[in-house]
Image (cartoon, helix red, strand yellow):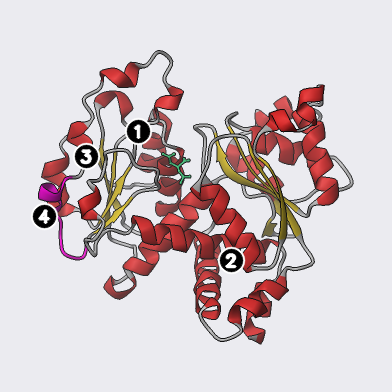
Amino acid sequence: MERLKTFEEYLRQPLEERLPYYEKNQRVYHVMVSQQFSYDFLMKLFDTADLVKHITHKPNGAEFLASVLQHKRAMLYFTQPSTRTFLSFLTACQTVGMNTGEVRDPSLSSELKGESQEDGLRTFSSYFDAIIMRDPKPGFCEYVAYCLDQTSRSVPIINGGSGKDQHPTQALLDVYTLYRSFQEQGGISGKTCCFVGDLLRGRAVRSVIYLLARYWKVEMYMVAPDTLQIAPDLEHFLQEQEIKVHKTDNLEEVLPHVDSLYMTRVQDEYDLSQESALLDYSKFHLTIENVQRMQKHAIIMHPLPRRHEIDPSIDSDPRAMYWRQLRNGMYIRAALLLYLFNMEHRLAEY
Ligand code: NCD
């Protein structure tokens, strides 16, 4: 596809017009935002993730999986703090046999010698077949994808979290967790999903909401202090999708009505002047007492890391899904890598 002259010109286009640039041969190529995943894409990816999970537990299964992408290499470029997403991608790469390289501290790379981040990333594309990245600058992943697409050696860019923007692979693992949890209860459609905490700046929340909008008749509760309620553009999107949204700051009251509860921490790294420190956030914490108000089949999620949003004594409750989310993340990211290199069909050989 012909590129526009400048990145600014490219970025001025609405997202719908930029989506085709994330594709090659009618397949997802760069993983940028969760709006790029169709319902059919999700279903196929979930099937692949189920297979990855199944095969890893079979005799010689892990060896077989590790042979599928052993000819590919991935670069992990994580210049914003990360424990889970970094390790999840690393273990996903190992699961499908990919070798990896990493930059976590740019002060140890040639950036210190004055090399631009763009040149650094172009260097990686010469050595690696995919770049998985997390950077504090919103839109930076998209910029890198744009720059590499102008060169003769473009590789898939996978957004592992871009500032307050989006975290599309977290959304994939979250919806995969919901899908698995509600398999016996008619699936995700028709369910009531509740989001609690910093809904304004949480990129995980934003990304998962876009994906849930793909399902039929999902209803949503948004529980947050006024100053951290969902952004107007996201609310507008949900209105357009005709999704029923209830905004409130009363967690206790909504607990008996929800099928899933998605807890989040205050994203105070984005504070302009420590304004979050003035907030009484305790109303938005899940305690062992108020978890009793939830339905038996309801599930509790959290993208982690947590602070005090969920009392650790809740961890042993069968409804607590946040540790399982981590395992699901590894399977879904392995499935995504298989998809990106068009190798998911190889699983049928096992
Ligand atoms: C989330 C993130 O980085 O956006 N964490 C994660 O990737 N598992 C959520 C958060 O940091 O609060």
- Packing grade of label 1 (10 A; few <14, some 14-19, many >=20) is many
Dot 3 or dot 2: first in sequence order is 3
> Can you identify the residue that label 1 sits on?
230
Residue at the (52%, 69%) spot, across then down? 49
Rendering quadrant holding ligand 1: top left
Nearer to us of marks 3 and 1 is: 3
Quarter-of-image position of residue 346: bottom right
Nearer to us of marks 3 and 2 is: 3
Residue at the (50%, 74%) spot, across then down? 53
Above or below: residue 124 compared with residue 275: below
Is-magenta flag for residue 293? yes
Distance from label 2 to label 4 (Cα)? Answer: 36 Å
Residue at the (35%, 35%) spot, across then down? 199
Dot 3 or dot 4: first in sequence order is 3
> Can you identify the residue that label 3 sits on?
285
> Can you identify the residue that label 2 sits on?
335
Above or below: residue 30 compared with residue 136: below
Residue 218 appears left or right of 327:
left
Is-magenta flag for residue 146? no
Dot 1 amino acid type: Ile
Q: Secondary structure at mark 1?
A: loop
Q: Is mark 3 within 8 Å of ligand 1?
A: no
Can the viewer see residue 318? yes
Magenta residue span: 287-297
Dot 1 or dot 2: first in sequence order is 1
Residue 173 appears left or right of 80:
left
**In-front residue for pair 319/255:** 319
Can the viewer see residue 4? no
Dot 4 amino acid type: Gln
- Packing grade of label 4 (10 A; few <14, some 14-19, many >=20) is few
Q: Secondary structure at mark 4?
A: loop
